[in-house]
Each structure stands twice: as structure tokens, then as C-alpha cells.
Amino acid sequence: MKAHSPTRWRFKRPSVIPGFGMALGLTLTWLTLLILIPLSGLAVRSSALGWEAFWSIALDPRTLNALRISFGSAFIAAIVNAVFGIILAWVLVRYRFPGKRIIDAMVDLPFALPTAVAGIALTTLYAPNGWIGQFLTPLGIKIAFTPAGIVVALIFVGLPFVVRTVQPVMEEIDKEVEEAAATLGANRFQTIFRVLLPGLAPAVLTGFALAFARGVGEYGSVIFIAGNLPFKSEIAPLLIIIKLEEYNYAAATGIAAIMLIISFAMLLVINLIQSGSRRRYGYGA
Amino acid sequence: MALDATVQPVKLRSVTTENRIARFTLIILSLVFLLLILLLPLAAVFVEAFRKGASPFFVALADTETFSAIRLTLIVAGVSVPLNLAFGVAAAWAIAKFEFKGKAFLTTLIDLPFSVSPVISGLVFVLLFGANTWLGQWFSAHNIKILFAVPGLILATMFVTFPFVARELIPLMQEQGTADEEAALSLGASGWQTFWYVTLPNIKWGLLYGVLLCNARAMGEFGAVSVVSGHIRGQTNTMPLQVEILYNEYNFTGAFAVATLLALLALVTLVLKTLLEMRYSAEIAASRRH
Amino acid sequence: MEVRVQNIRKEFDRFPALHDVSLDIRSGELIALLGPSGSGKTTLLRLIAGLESPTEGLIFFGDEDASKKSVQQRNIGFVFQHYALFRYMTVLENVSFGLKVRNSARRPAKADIHRRALELLDLVQLSGLEKRYPAQLSGGQRQRVALARAMAVEPNVLLLDEPFGALDAQVRKDLRKWLREIHDRTGHTTVFVTHDQDEALELADRVVVMSQGAIEQIGTPDEVYDNPNSPFVFGFIGQSNCLEVEISGGDLRFEGRSLGLNAEGEPDGVAQLYFRPHDVRLCESAENCIAGQPVSSRRVAGTRHIELDIGNNRPHIEIELPPSEADRLDRNRIAFKPTRWKLFRG
């Protein structure tokens, strides 16, 4: 009898199922051609800039303002979506009321509706003489063509993210835990805020991160309502396009690279927080 | 204590819910929020399109430029979606049915387009195929236009819609496991027969769901195609781009008319999505469990 | 704190879970609600807790009508079968929770809460684990945390819903003994629900046997075991055999033959004879005894369980004998008669 061969490093566990090579090959080819090469093209071009050129683009006041507006508006919109997302998810999961089914389906509208359509619709609503804007103008509140308009558009775009990540977690809430809190004397308020919400925090954080990431890069729904004034209400993606139209590929590449780096860094931080919480509290968080 | 034991006891509110006022307030708050952010904008599209009456609406849609925009959108989606569908199935097959190193990394790569701004998604192709690049010059020497032409639009759209089908199928196929396929193989079926007769029926609802979302995004994509399209009227404008052009020319009826079509597409997508979820969530869950 | 359940009826959407249940629980006693699933025992427990409200009837804590009080106001301690610990809080935070959520009038100082929680953890033998999270504990440890948490609020009544149901057999046995010790030390009125009659008999001061929404019998473990007052209780508690017999003139007859057992005072007629497998003695001959053929013989701990076929397609009888006696037996025929039994009619 031959002795057992020592365990070698194996790429793939042997399996009777066919088609691995073909499927993986197809996947990798497609992935490389469509995603990796274009993205590395960006990486190569931005590193070809050289540090000096890169920093001068990065620190250019217009760039900084555009980044500030993009990230800042996305942050505020994501916070709003986090708060209302929790409320919406709570109402959808735990209450019954007429039309709930329809409302639940409508939450996905921002996923399905083209961003340009959302952009012109929101502008029409919140312009000074718009459906809603007309009531706000006499109060001195301007939404369209100001940074506030950007936030409104990003709230629209990010709305489903927190709701959809929180809903499944809420559905899994153990009723007995709520009953336990009640038997210990906690009123509804205390039960919700001290016992249930901490359990939802990871899901809310994930939803927040997704809404934030989406908001940072959003273009179509924002440019109509934004006003697009440099330094005031100009978002970073628009600045990239402007630089492209000026054939200033260097600037466009630089700004894109900065956006990607900051976004990836943030997502990494959020992922770390999440795996840390999983280790402590166990899975199913 | 001599109490009448048939006295009706006090009815206590269920322990796990709030009092009526709180519930009412939360529901109203949610509905107002949704109204302001979701429902009114949707209504605005339809109202503004028909503001000047039904006839200008149809005239706007019959406009030649608009017509070619519709056609172009259908072509772009018609190419991107099937290609990404094929990719999605291949990727899900490799990832779900086999164990190999680097799987998590692969899945992250597949998800990349989601984390990239649409404008950047278009930018990368401009950088790749631009007039001053090696590839760009090769293509123009062969008289093939990529940027500012249909191929560019297709590439940008495929980039953006790349993960949809795969993301839907991978978890589904992972939960279904390999038992069914192994059974079919042991009965003598070939690889293709197994895939066609065993795997496909198992994943059909996830597949439909992924295609639905992929298509909605493909037809509605704006930022990425805006960068690569060149906005050549009648030639490289998809419907979303046409909406922008009409709107910037203050042709609101025209812009909202095209927007109406896109909004209808969105509603149909939502309805189909909900139907799929409702009727077949039991089946999807069951096929996920077995 | 004594608890009085008075004529409670509970219906869930027309499904009757409890019919006219009344029960007096004495202050400081450890009482078990025992029954199969569907007997209504958990429903009764939850009604006492205030997690459900009765369709009809009243519940008193001491002299006060508890029905008007919400669960938060009743000051009870509830332990769930699956622990229901707050997974995002440490063990210490879990145990302190009941004290921390009190309104400022009744809330103890932070230092006192901390001290009390540590004392309780010491009582349940979990000192040193304060900073752990529930996910890092074993099942038995989690249940002890749940108990400490429930006791922290100095409850009027401690209510446990199948507290050991989710645990391994050995852990279950250990925790049973330990629960009795804790109860003896703290003296809380304790009501626990179980479907395991061994557990009820071993732990409780009194046992309430329930079936299909009604109370069958209330008594000490000895009472319900030795003097069951219905076929259900006889059959549910401990092992039992049942034979159809005829009584005539104070004499018990089985299959026409007298069994030589005294049934004086019992009216004539057909009845069910219930007896326990270990309440039998062997006979030398089949005279005045029940004869049967051994079908199987198993060694179970310190006794032999022998299954007998007594013919006529009747259900097999099980008897228990010490191994020394069992080994002397003729393999083909055994004759026995019950030494203790109960007769039920109808």
C-alpha cells in the first residue's frame, strides 16, 4: 500500500462537478477585460501624474470644495436615511396598516428609477416655484439650486439602503427578549433604546455605509437640482466631467483617484468595525 | 375577598408593542417622509408630462431624436443584459459549486462596480480608449469608434450592471449546494444536461430577479454613459441622456414625456419584482433551504 | 408573596387554552406546573406574569388584584426556556438591567447596583464572568445568568418556563439540584413549568398536574405519585399498567378469575385497574394471579424490566423486579399480582 502523500497546497478541492475551468476562465476573462483593465488604467494614469501634480490637483480649492460638498452632502443624507430608515423599517415590520404592501414595494423605487428622471422630478418639486418649493420660498427656505437640494436628491437615492438592510434584522428580533425586558420593569422606550437598537446598530451601520457610498458618487439625480456653482454647489463627479470636457485628463484622473481612495478607506473602516462586533457578540448580528 | 369572578378583567396592551398614539405618529411620520421624497417626485413626472395636454405628450414621443434615443436604449440594454447574464451564471457556477482559494477576493472584485461612481465608471473607458491612448489609436486606425459611439455606451453600461445577476445567483446557488447536481451526474447526465435540466430550474427565479434589476439599471444608467457618449443627438443619446438634453433646452414637456416612459419602466420593474418576491419567495426560500 | 389564581379562562382566537383554572400558591413555595404540550401550563404562567391577559377571571398577588397591573408593574422575575439574554450587553449589564431601568425614585445608586449584581453572580456561581457576552457562555451558564437577572429585582414571584428544556441531560440534572438550593436560600415564591415529571417530582414542594387546559390534581410529589386521582395523572406520572377488571361483591375479577384482591366497598361493575410496574409481587402459581409470557427483559439501572404478554391481544404489561428475583424465573411463564393499585371507572 502506498503511503499517504503529504498534504500539498491545492488551489481547488477536487469535485465531480464539471465545468470549473470553463466557468472560472470565463469569469476571470470577463472580469479582467471589463473591470480590472479599465480600473487599472485609472490607477496607472493617476500614478503617472507624479506626486506634485497629484497634490496640486488635490489641494486645488475647487477640488477641495467639490469633495467637501460630495462627501458632506452624502454624509448628511445618509444620516437622515439612517434615522428614517429605522423608523420605516420598524413601521413596515411591526405594524399593520392599509397600503403597507404597496409602501413596502415603493421603497425600492430609487433602485428602479433612472437617476435623471429622479433629478428632474425633484427639481420640479423643490424649485422656488415648484410644487413644494412654492410654500418654502415665502419662509426664506431655498432647496433647489443650493447644497440643500443636493442633500434632498441624495436622500432619495439612498433611501432603500438602510431600510432594506435593517428590515431582515428586525424581522428576526426575538420576542422573548422584549418580553424579558418588560418583565424586568423596562417600559417600551427603554426596551427599544437600550435592548433592541443596539442589536440593530451593525445593520444600520452597513446601510449607512452603502447609502453614503452611493451618495458620494451620485451624479444624475444631483446635477439638475444642484445649481452646480463652483465652490458652492458643485459635486466632485461633475467636476470630473468638466475637467474631461476641458481635455484636462490629468485633473479628471486625479480627482477620480482621490474619490476612490477615500471611499475605499471608509468602507474598510466600516468593515473592520463590523467584524469586530461579530467576534464579540456572535453571528446573527 | 368576595369578588365576582366573572368580572371582565382589564385588557392589557400586548407587551411587545407601543401605545396607539406612538404607533400612529410613527406611521404618519413615515408616510409623510415617503410622500415628500418618493411619491411626489414620481407623481410630478406624470403630471408635468401631461401638463399641456395629451397631444403634446405623444408628439414629443414621436420626435425622431427621441425615437432613436428609445431605440438606442433598447439596443444597449439588449446587448449588455444577456452578456452580463451569461457572465453572472458562469461566475455563480464557479463560486457556488466549488471550493477554491481566493473565493472571497473574487466576490469582492465582482462587487467593485458597485463602489465606483458612475462618472468614474465612464471615465475609465475614456482613459482607456481616448484618442491619445494606444488602444484608442489602434481602434481608430481600423475605423472602429468606441468612444462617442454605441460600443462605448455598451461597455460603460456593462461595467455598471456587471454584478447584478452574479450577486443574485451566488448566494442562491450557494445555499442550494451541490447535492442535486451530484445526483444528476451519478445518474449519468452530462455537464450540460445537468446544468440545463437540474440547475437552471432551481435558479430560475433568482435569475429572473437579477435580470430584472440588471435591465432596470441598464436602461436607466446616466452618469457613466454621459461621460462616454459625446451627446451626439440622434446617435449616441440614450433615453436618460435625451431627458437631460430636452430639459436643458427648457423643453419640459418633451423631457418629462421621455421620463414618463422611464418611470413606467421603473414601475413595471417594481411590480414584477414584488410579484416575483411574493409568489416565489416561498419557493426561493425552499430551494434555498434544501 | 402568595399568588391566587381565581377562575381563569383564556381563549386565543376562540381556541380555549384554559378552562376555569383556580390555584392558590403559598408564599415561598416552589410549585411545578406539570403537563404535556397543550395542557395550558405555559399559558397559565404567562397569565400570572402579565405577558397575556385572561379572557375571564382574576389573579391576585397577596391581596391586590394584579390584573390591572402591566407586566412591568407586577415586579415578577421571568426565566425563558431559551434564556432571552440581551446579547449586546455583558453578563453584568444583563443582571443589572432590571435595577437600571427603574425610575429615579426607586433606582438604587450605581455602586449599589454594581454590588448587588456581583452578589447575584456569586450566588449563581458565575463570579469572574461579568465582562463576558452571552455568546461566549455555555447553555447552562446562560440560564444561570437569566436566573440572576430575574432575581435582581427582588421579585414577588419567580416564574420559570421550562428553564432547563434547552440544555443537555447532565447539565439539566445539575441545574435542577442547584435551583432547589437557590430557592431554599432565597425563599422566593417560585412557579416553574415543565413537561418532565421527574423534574417536577424532584424539585417541587407541590405539583399541579394539568391536561388540556384544566387542572387534574394538585398535591405534593408523594401525593400525586402514590394517590393519583385520575387515569390521566396515574398514567402521566410514573409508569403504569392498566387492566380491565370486573368487580363483584368486593372481589376483583380478571378474565373471569378472582385475583384475590380486596375491593371492599367498591360498587359492582366494570373498572380500570391501574398499577405501577414496581408494585407487583410474583406468585408461585397462576392461582389468583395474572399470568403472562415474557416477551422481553431489559436491565435498567438497578432493576429488571420485564414485558409480559398476557394473551387475548391485550397491551403488554411491564413489571419491574430486582435482578435477583428476576433471574430465578421460569423463562416461559410468569405469574404476578399487584400489591398497590387504583380503580377508576368510566
Image (tube, coloured by chain):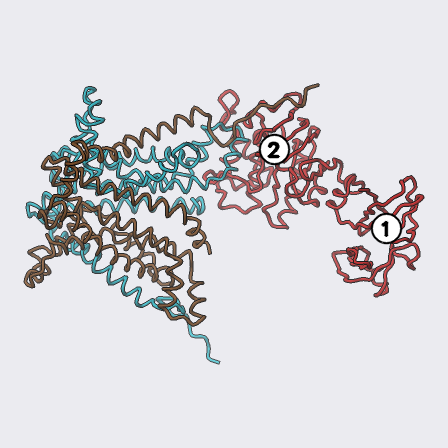
Chain colours: A cyan, B brown, C red
Q: What amino acid type should be assigned to the residue bearing mark 1?
A: Pro
Q: Residue at x 85, y 63 (%)?
A: C333
Q: What amino acid type should be assigned to the residue bearing mark 2?
A: Glu
Dot 2: few (<14), some (14–19), or many (≥20) neighbours within 10 Å?
Answer: some
Q: Badge 1 is on which residue?
A: C338
Q: Badge 2 is on which residue?
A: C11
Residue B235 left/right relative to B222: left
Residue B271 coordinates in the image, percent (x, y): 33, 43
Q: Is residue A93 above or below residue C285?
A: above
Q: CA distance from mark 2 to mark 1?
A: 43 Å
Q: Nearer the viewer, residue C193 or C303?
A: C193
Q: Kindly indicate whether the residues beneath marks 2 and 1 are on one polypeptide chain.
A: yes
Q: Nearer the viewer, residue C247 or C80?
A: C247
Question: Dot 2: what SS?
Answer: strand
Q: Residue furthest bottom?
A: A1
Residue C19 coordinates in the image, percent (x, y): 67, 33
Q: Quadrant of the C terminus of chain A?
A: top left
What chain does mark 2 sit on?
C
Residue A263 coordinates in the image, percent (x, y): 24, 45
Whether residue B53 can be seen here: yes
Task: Please tell me in which quadrant of the rendered image residue B62 appears.
Answer: top left
Q: Nearer the viewer, residue C321 or C100?
A: C321
Whether residue A65 can be seen here: no
Q: Residue at x 82, y 59 (%)?
A: C311
How many numbered markers are drawn? 2
- Please tell me which of labels 2 and 1 falls first in the chain: 2
The reply to whether callout 2 and callout 1 are in contact (CB within 8 Å) is no
